[in-house]
């Protein structure tokens, strides 16, 4: 049953550093095609900058469209890293080890992708720095009452925290890479590894820093998506957004889509880098179980949101809900969203066979993320279309080609980021894997052998 | 200057839906020309719009008109959400928009329940022959920023300044003070003035219609608690349910 | 007890060093179960007096009639308090059991036994069926009820079903979990004795065959999961139909979840206090640092969560400044119950946050206990604040979009005080009575731990290896 690896340290070093020191054949092709998609998107952005926001599909009253949807989506994905690394580290779940870094790297790049969406979205991106506490000649500080000032603070803190988190966990591996690299890369690794030589004191400091950061980054983790949800929930102008449940609902939704994205990445790691020795069906099994719980909690909050929307029986709210589920094109989208985010994946995960197969997890988790993207869209756009009692101003929205290209480009950007990272740094934490091997044991119970952990 | 609180009364009983206010506003405030494609894109900018609702079934159908423009709320939902203080409340009860500060997040527009905030999706353009028609007192807004009804703040400023220079005070109902829409209204639907001056028309109407026992006055979408400076007077009609619905 | 080995603190994974064989565990725990303390009866009597006071209080309340809801606020509050504390305590056994946390083993039974307190909730709930105002004045309901329509859309029906379900599931959980222990007690009792008969009846045909164990483990998992779901349902229904619908304009989609999160926090606090009493006064020294440490961490996390959930609701109402939402805040937070709100906020969030962040305190026995007391008092204040306020709102019509007048503070009268005393003593009485029948430490789970635990040499240190069965 249990297929955790018992590879020797040497083997781990060799196989995990292989693609960092060498160059896998498929890498350039993959990176190149993603770059192409990204550049197309940037071209579209240039067009938008040149022409104005008119080239997008937003209008009155649908002032927020694809970009904000995409922003929320990527912020959601960014919750994967901390969920998997910090929470699973603090709760000492052993299966986290091979995937922590991939999850953190995903966090990093999805946060940057989310921030670029803000630049796509605003009318005058060249003045966007005014949102920061940058007081130069204007003599005006940002308005701290605005959720749009809380947003950059929270996201910025999260970005810095996650970067530190990735870096701290990377130091021993950088040292390992330094010891094996030659020439110029060796110098770079030498600088980055901060003189790590593996002395007991260095290990202790590294471990303490990791645990401290896990604990400190957790409140930030919660605040980020809560604040993003308050961008919507505090508005009184949009009936469909003004709900107290938004903060926990967004967080659990973020964990749902984030952890799904990690599972998807795990499948890719097995296929592309052939790390099936380190990422085994057991790991997929564990993340699948976690996902069942997360998805069901998410569904509970989803149901609460709907129950209390209908409970009000206010005409504006009923009109919105009717629009969301019965009318074209929102109705079919709603159906797709429901099926893909819950009703296909969760029943599928109940089967051990699906949970243990990379392909099964890959397909279901992609479905989840399609569904969760649509979830954000269905919260943001229909609510704006049916936003207030003034029926005269009900509106419509269709994304333009520019928006579609730009949204696509963010996916390419995150893909490029992860690929680039994996080219330069080991994507599976080497030291963590070795530690896992050391702490692993087995206990004979009758005729069965039960996996066991040495208690630290 | 101190102690002023500008307000407006809209008597729906007098409104015929003729749209002269809309035209007057366009020309006074340098609003870009709203052509058909722009309307189809739902990106037309109308600081004041006349909403039309149908009541009843054909042939017993009635058109109901309600002019909607910035309500200059005392507790304006648009103000706290602006990250750069592009919109704030001034000392005369006006909810003002500072074009140069705006970065175009469009958050204010989402948080305005009246939907009277407009975004410049395109760079505004006028035909060559229109260039001399632009009002020199009003900024031409570039793309990427929000704008909305100002109660023609340039007219308020000019009259106040002139009055100060001449040592007089601003006269209630002065055509130079009134916003363009008020001057253009043929039926006297719109009344503008200082709500703090108990002698002004708006203050008297507010006193009798909003605070009086059998008044017709109400604030648009009062439930939102925005405390608008605009008071609507109900249509005198036994079946005027539509306005009632917004009460 | 001899000195413990391996330099590990006593109570490390319920590690009594003398418990090395199943026989020694049986011997010791059965002996402790059968031992009788001289304090048992006096305490029982004292609790009995409390229960009698509660009954008197309830009768006094009933004499006043059920038409004036404001008189029943305290009864509703204490009922909610029971659902929040005692009924949630079994989660401490259920959740770690599903997550295969070994530290639960010694406290799983004390946690499950709290489910018996559901009986008292059920009794208190009966008058509430009549107290709940009729829907005919246009009051909102979760069930979109309109007078004269189908009976199935009734708050009374669903709440009763779920509460009865919770009690049945609680007893089922306790029974299934105790089955092997009942069988043990049956086999050890003298033939023909009273105990023998009792345990033969309770243990049914348990023989300890593999099939029996598979059946028991399976049911334990399912009933545990169902208990959790039912607990959430009960909190959802009670917090909506018996609380939120009474206040016009209080449309807080998060509140049912908040109510349930309070329950998880208070359930952990209840268990920490129970553990302290068992350790300090009943001689179960095996309940030790691991349990206090584990639950302390959990309570710390839940205190943070308390703030987050509260903030999420408060933020949206406060920022939006809509008049009807301001009135709701005025009623519950800023208005007549402000001191209770402050007390609630400090005891449930501020105190745990600034104390439990301190490792020294979290590792101790008395630290988490004192903070649990603080949390329980805070939650009690919270329940009073919310329920008494909601039950005192006079005009509950949904037609009106807000509260017409903020009602003044309702102070408890003698009957309320008696009811509160009764409602708190009665579950403890039930708990103590049940502990005479059900062994308070899970004997079979202790024996099971022996299979999964191993001490071995690792380089120069001796370490403990813990198995995690699939």
Image (tube, coloured by chain):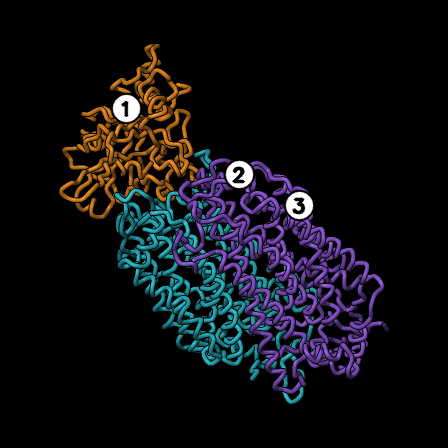
Is A139 located above or below residue A309 in the figure?
above
Chain in orange in the render: B
Residue C95 in sight from this viewpoint? no
* Residue denoted by label 1: B191
Secondary structure found at label 1: strand
Q: CA distance from mark 2 to mark 3?
A: 28 Å
User: Going by the image, does C165 lie left or right of C347?
Assistant: left
Q: Quadrant of residue C189?
A: bottom right
User: Going by the image, does C122 lie left or right of A409?
Assistant: right
User: Going by the image, does B153 lie left or right of A165?
Assistant: left
* Residue denoted by label 2: C330
Between C179 and C262, the residue placed more toward the observer is C179
Residue A328 locus on image (x, y percent):
26, 59
Pointers 2 and 1 in contact (C-beta within 8 Å): no
Residue occupying the point 25% across, 31% down:
B235
Quarter of the figure that contains the N terminus of chain C: bottom right
Q: Colour of chain C?
A: purple
Between B179 and C376, the residue placed more toward the observer is C376
* Residue denoted by label 3: C415
Mark nearest the camera among 2 and 1 is: 2
The label number, if any, that marks residue C216 in the structure image: none
Q: CA distance from mark 2 to mark 1?
A: 37 Å
Q: Colour of chain A?
A: cyan
Between C44 and C107, the residue placed more toward the observer is C44
The disc, 2 or 3, on the residue closer to the chain's N-terminal end is 2
Residue B171 locus on image (x, y percent):
31, 15
Is A157 located above or below residue A427 in the figure?
above
Residue A355 locus on image (x, y percent):
47, 77
């Amino acid at each position: 049953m249990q297929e955790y690896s018992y590879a020797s340290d040497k083997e781990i070093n060799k196989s995990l550093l292989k693609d960092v020191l060498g160059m896998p054949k498929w890498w350039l092709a993959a990176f190149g095609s993603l770059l192409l998609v990204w550049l197309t998107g940037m071209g579209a952005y240039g067009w938008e900058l040149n022409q104005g926001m008119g080239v997008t599909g937003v209008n009155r009253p649908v002032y927020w469209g694809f970009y904000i949807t995409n922003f929320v989506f990527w912020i959601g994905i960014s919750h994967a890293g901390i969920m998997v690394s910090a929470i699973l580290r603090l709760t000492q779940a052993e299966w986290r080890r091979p995937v922590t870094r991939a999850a953190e790297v995903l966090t990093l790049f999805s946060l940057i992708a989310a921030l670029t969406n803000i630049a796509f979205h605003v009318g005058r991106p060249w003045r966007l720095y005014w949102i920061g506490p940058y007081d130069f000649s204007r003599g005006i500080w940002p308005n701290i009452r605005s959720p749009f000032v809380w947003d950059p603070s929270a996201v910025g803190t999260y970005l810095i925290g996650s970067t530190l988190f990735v870096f701290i966990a990377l130091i021993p591996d950088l040292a390992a890479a330094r010891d094996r690299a030659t020439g110029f890369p060796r110098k770079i690794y030498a600088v980055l590894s901060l003189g790590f030589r593996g002395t007991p004191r260095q290990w202790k400091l590294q471990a303490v820093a990791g645990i401290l950061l896990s604990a400190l980054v957790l409140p930030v983790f919660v605040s980020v998506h809560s604040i993003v949800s308050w961008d919507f929930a505090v508005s009184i102008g949009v009936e469909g957004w003004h709900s107290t449940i938004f903060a926990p609902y967004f967080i659990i939704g973020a964990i749902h889509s984030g952890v799904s994205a990690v599972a998807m990445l795990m499948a890719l790691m097995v296929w592309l880098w052939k790390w099936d020795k380190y990422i085994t069906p057991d790991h997929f099994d564990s993340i699948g179980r976690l996902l069942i719980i997360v998805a069901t909690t998410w569904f509970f909050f989803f149901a609460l949101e709907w129950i209390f929307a209908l409970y009000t029986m206010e005409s504006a709210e009923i009109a919105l809900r009717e629009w969301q589920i019965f009318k074209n094109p929102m109705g079919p989208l709603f159906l797709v969203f429901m099926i893909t985010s819950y009703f296909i994946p969760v029943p599928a995960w109940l089967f051990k066979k699906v949970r243990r197969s990379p392909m099964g997890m890959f397909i279901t988790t992609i479905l989840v993320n399609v569904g969760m993207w649509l979830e954000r869209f269905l919260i943001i756009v229909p609510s704006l279309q049916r936003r207030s009692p003034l029926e005269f101003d009900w509106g419509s929205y269709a994304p333009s080609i520019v928006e579609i290209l730009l949204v696509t480009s963010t996916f390419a950007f995150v893909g490029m980021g992860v690929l680039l990272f994996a080219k330069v740094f080991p994507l599976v934490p080497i030291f963590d894997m070795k530690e896992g091997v050391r702490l692993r044991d087995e206990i004979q119970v009758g005729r069965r052998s039960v996996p066991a952990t040495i208690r630290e | 200057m101190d102690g002023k609180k500008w307000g407006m009364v809209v008597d729906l009983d007098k409104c015929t839906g003729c749209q002269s206010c809309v035209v007057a506003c366009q020309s006074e405030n340098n609003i870009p020309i709203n052509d058909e494609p722009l309307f189809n894109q739902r990106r037309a900018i109308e600081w004041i719009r006349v909403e039309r609702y149908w009541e009843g079934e054909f042939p017993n159908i009635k058109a109901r008109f309600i002019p909607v423009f910035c309500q200059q709320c005392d507790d304006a939902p648009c103000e706290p959400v602006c990250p750069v203080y592009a919109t704030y409340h001034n000392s005369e009860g006006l909810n003002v928009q500072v074009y140069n500060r705006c970065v175009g997040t469009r958050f204010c527009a989402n948080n305005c329940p009246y939907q009277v905030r407009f975004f410049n999706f395109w760079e505004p353009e006028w035909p060559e022959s229109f260039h001399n028609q632009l009002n020199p007192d009003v900024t031409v807004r570039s793309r990427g920023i929000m704008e909305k009804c100002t109660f023609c703040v340039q007219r308020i400023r000019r009259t106040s300044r002139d009055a100060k220079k001449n040592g007089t005070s601003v006269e209630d109902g002065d055509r130079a003070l009134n916003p363009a829409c008020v001057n253009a209204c043929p039926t006297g639907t719109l009344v503008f003035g200082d709500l703090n001056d108990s002698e002004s028309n708006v203050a008297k109407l507010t006193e009798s219609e909003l605070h009086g026992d059998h008044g017709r006055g109400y604030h648009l979408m009062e439930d939102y608690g925005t405390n608008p400076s605009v008071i609507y007077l109900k249509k005198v009609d036994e079946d005027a349910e539509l306005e009632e619905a917004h009460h | 007890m001899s000195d413990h080995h391996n330099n590990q603190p006593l109570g490390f994974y319920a590690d009594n060093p003398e418990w090395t064989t199943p026989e020694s565990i049986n011997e010791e725990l059965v002996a402790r179960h059968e031992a009788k303390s001289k304090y048992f009866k006096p305490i029982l009597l004292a609790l009995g007096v409390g229960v009698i006071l509660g009954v008197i209080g309830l009768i006094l309340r009933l004499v006043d009639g059920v038409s004036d809801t404001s008189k029943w606020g305290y009864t509703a509050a204490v009922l909610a308090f029971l659902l929040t504390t005692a009924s949630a305590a079994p989660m401490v056994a259920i959740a770690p059991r599903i997550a295969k946390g070994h530290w639960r083993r010694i406290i799983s039974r004390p946690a499950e036994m709290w489910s018996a307190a559901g009986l008292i909730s059920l009794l208190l709930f009966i008058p509430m069926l009549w107290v709940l105002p009729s829907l005919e004045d246009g009051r909102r309901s979760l069930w979109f009820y309109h007078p004269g329509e189908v009976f199935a859309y009734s708050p009374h029906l669903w709440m009763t079903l779920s509460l009865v379900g919770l009690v049945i599931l609680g007893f089922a959980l306790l029974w299934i979990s105790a089955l092997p222990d009942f069988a043990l007690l049956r086999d050890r009792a003298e033939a023909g004795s009273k105990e023998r008969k009792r345990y033969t009846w309770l243990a049914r045909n348990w023989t300890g065959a593999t099939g029996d164990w598979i059946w028991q483990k399976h049911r334990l998992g399912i009933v545990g999961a169902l208990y959790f779901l039912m607990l959430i349902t009960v909190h959802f229904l009670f917090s909506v139909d018996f609380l939120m619908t009474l206040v016009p304009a209080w449309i807080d989609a998060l509140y049912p979840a908040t109510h349930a999160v309070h329950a998880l926090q208070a359930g952990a606090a209840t268990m920490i206090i129970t553990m302290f009493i068992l350790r300090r006064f009943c001689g179960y020294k095996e309940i030790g640092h691991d349990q206090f440490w584990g639950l302390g961490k959990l309570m710390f996390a839940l205190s943070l969560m308390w703030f987050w959930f509260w903030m999420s609701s408060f933020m949206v109402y406060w920022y939006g400044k809509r008049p009807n939402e301001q009135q709701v805040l005025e009623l519950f937070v800023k208005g007549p119950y402000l001191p209770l709100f402050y007390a609630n906020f400090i005891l449930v969030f501020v105190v745990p946050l600034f104390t439990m962040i301190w490792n020294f305190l979290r590792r101790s026995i008395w630290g988490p206990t004192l903070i649990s007391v603080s949390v329980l008092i805070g939650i009690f204040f919270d329940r009073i604040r919310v329920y008494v306020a909601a039950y005192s709102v006079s005009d509950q019509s949904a037609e009106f979009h807000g509260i017409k007048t903020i009602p003044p503070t309702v102070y408890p009268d003698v009957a309320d005080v008696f009811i509160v005393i009764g409602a708190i003593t009665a579950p403890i009485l039930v708990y103590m009575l049940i502990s005479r029948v059900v062994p308070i430490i899970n004997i079979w789970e202790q024996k099971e731990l022996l299979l999964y635990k191993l001490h071995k040499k690792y380089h120069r240190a001796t370490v403990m290896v813990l198995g995690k069965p699939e």
